[in-house]
Image: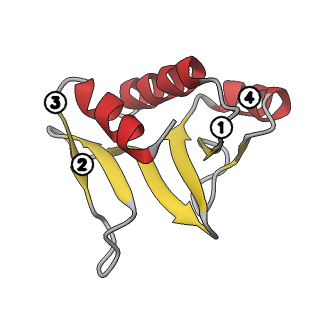
Amino acid sequence: MKKEEIVKYSLSLPDTYKDYPFPDDNISITMKHTKNKKWFALIMNVKGQLYLNVKTDPNYSELLRSSYEYIIPAYHMNKEHWNTIVVTDNIDVQLVKELIKQSYELTK
């Protein structure tokens, strides 16, 4: 899964837009709700690796981390409510889409 695919899928959800949240950084992208302006995904490059932060139910977060080696506690965000998906060639694309959609719903 590529960065563009994550953005495209995120924008397919109703009332969303992409934003560049950090001055002088045109690489990191937040996916936001148009109505409340809350983030539901943060896409960034960390040490040459694509990271995707999504909000998850805290009861589900630890299960995800223990079940998938590419899901880790959130990079620079609340680790109770957010997870990072290290985007590699071996990720489950359907799972990533499901987690984006769940994050979208949790942040409405």
Residue beneath disc 1: 89
Colour scheme of this structure image? secondary structure
- At 37% from the left and 29% from the top, the residue drawn is 104
Work out how far the residue at label 1 is from the one at label 2, CA to CA, in angstroms: 24 Å
Mark 1–mark 2 contact, CB under 8 Å? no
Q: Which mark is residue 64?
A: 4
Residue beneath disc 3: 15
Q: Where residue 10 appears, x then y in whole percent?
A: 33, 33
Mark 4–mark 3 contact, CB under 8 Å? no
Q: Amino acid at mark 3?
A: Asp
Q: Where residue 70 appears, x then y in whole percent?
A: 73, 40
Which mark is in front, 4 or 2?
2
10, above or below 95, in the image: below
Furthest-bottom residue in this view = 24
Work out how far the residue at label 4 is from the one at label 3, CA to CA, in angstroms: 27 Å
- At 78% from the left and 31% from the top, the residue drawn is 68
Side (left or right) of 35 relative to 76 = left
Q: Amino acid at mark 4?
A: Leu
Work out how far the residue at label 4 is from the one at label 2, CA to CA, in angstroms: 26 Å
- At 34% from the left and 29% from the top, the residue drawn is 9
Name the quadrant containing residue 87: top right
